């Protein structure tokens, strides 16, 4: 899908595609996604918990109703919407029912800051946002998972993480606690950029180098499938043991923009975010 956004710096051309599939094993697709400029997000309802599909759908509904008519929200309003989504899920709990309805949330939003427009990446859980420069695939987000903590502590290797018994355990989620702690990044809007937003149904079936090969080899003119559909198809061919959802966003500035600011966090909120920037 195509969309153009008029910025003070010039015209920002957006081309995006999205796809979601229940997979080869699950009977219900607990993933939900929103691909509606200026917001692109994936929510993965927590498997084994009650109403995982309802949880992810609720997050999408909150973002759609809150930011759906905003051309470019502020970073503060995106963070506030994440909090509102968490509150909505907490309110869905039934008195006396100890079951939990939760979801991961990861995404990308075009936001307006005091220094200009930026891409804002946000994340709660183990769904991911990557960026692709045509040569290398870089994971922007940091997984909030038990396995990631073990990796960071040097207690397991990346190979061991693939089949670790705790690989499905997330350490942060929407709808589990009264307050939610989201990681955010502010990235410059410049030149040609490609972002990939996905649930772990993609990243657990395909290694990063396999994802990069598909991105590099896709020919939009010669293929009957979108790049998002091709990635989902590859995850299914690799096993498809979970729901898989993918959004690919290509952006192109049609006029030069200032690149004085590299990956950064700005404004009063952003200064706080700088202090809590996720570990690398």
Image: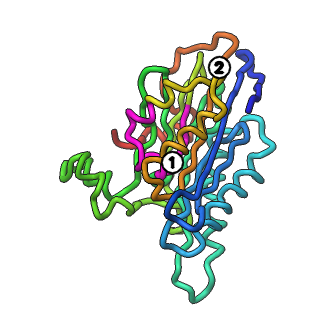
Query: In percent of the image, x 57 and y 23: which residue is there?
Result: 193
Q: Position of residue 216 (x, y in %)?
A: 49, 24
**In the rendered view, would you say 81 is above or below 100?**
above
Instruction: Quadrant for the C terminus, please.
Output: top left
Image coords of residue 212 (percent x, y): 44, 30
* Label 1 residue SS: strand
Q: Find the magenta span and give its range.
A: 195-212
Q: Secondary structure at mark 2?
A: strand
**Frontmost residue, 265 versus 49:** 49
Q: Which mark is residue 247?
A: none
Q: In terms of image quadrants, where is residue 117? A: top right
Its colouring scheme is: rainbow
Q: Which mark is residue 123?
A: 1
Q: Which residue corresponds to mark 2?
A: 252
Quick one: 52 or 18, which is closer to the camera?
18
Upstream in sequence: badge 1 or badge 2: 1
**Other-residue count near label 1 (Cα within 10 Å), few / some / many at <14 / 14–19 / ≥20:** many
Assess whether mark 2 and mark 1 are in contact (beta carbons under 8 angstroms). no
Residue at (74% x, 51% y) in the render = 64
Work out whether residue 207 or residue 193 is closer to the camera in this orientation and state it.
207
Q: Is residue 248 above or below residue 136?
A: below
Separation of marks 1 and 2 at Cα, in angstroms: 24 Å
- Residue, far right: 69
Point 56% across, 27% down: residue = 194
At x 77% / y 25%, what residue is drawn?
Answer: 4
Frontmost of labels 1 and 2 is 2
| 47 displayed left or right of 145 | right
Compared across the picture, whether 18 is left or right of 243 comes to right
Query: What residue occupies the far bottom of the structure in this picture?
Result: 96
Residue 211 belongs to magenta span: yes
Magenta-span inclusion, residue 66: no
């Amino acid at each position: 899908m195509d969309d153009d956004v008029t910025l003070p710096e010039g015209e920002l051309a957006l081309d995006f595609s999205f796809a979601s599939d229940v997979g080869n094993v699950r009977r219900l697709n607990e993933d939900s996604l929103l691909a509606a400029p200026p917001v692109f997000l994936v929510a993965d309802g927590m498997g084994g918990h009650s109403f995982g599909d309802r949880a992810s759908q609720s997050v999408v509904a909150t973002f759609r109703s809150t930011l759906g008519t905003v051309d470019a929200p502020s970073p503060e309003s995106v963070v506030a919407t994440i909090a509102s989504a968490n509150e909505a899920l907490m309110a869905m709990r039934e008195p006396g029912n100890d079951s939990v309805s939760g979801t991961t949330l990861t995404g990308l939003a075009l936001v307006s800051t005091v220094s200009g427009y930026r891409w804002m990446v946000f994340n709660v859980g183990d769904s991911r946002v990557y960026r692709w420069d045509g040569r290398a695939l870089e994971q922007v987000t940091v997984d909030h998972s038990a396995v990631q903590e073990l990796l960071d502590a040097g207690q397991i290797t990346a190979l061991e993480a693939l089949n670790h018994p705790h690989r499905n355990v997330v350490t942060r989620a929407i709808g589990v606690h009264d307050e939610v702690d989201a990681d955010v990044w502010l990235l410059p809007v410049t030149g040609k950029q490609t972002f990939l937003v996905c649930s772990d149904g993609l990243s657990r079936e395909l290694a990063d180098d396999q994802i990069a090969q598909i991105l590099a080899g896709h020919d939009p003119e010669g293929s009957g499938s979108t790049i998002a559909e091709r990635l989902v198809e590859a995850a299914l061919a690799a096993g498809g043991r979970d729901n898989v959802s993918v959004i690919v966003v290509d952006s192109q500035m049609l006029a030069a923009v200032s690149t004085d600011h590299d990956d950064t966090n700005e404004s009063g909120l952003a200064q706080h975010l700088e202090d809590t920037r996720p570990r690398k």
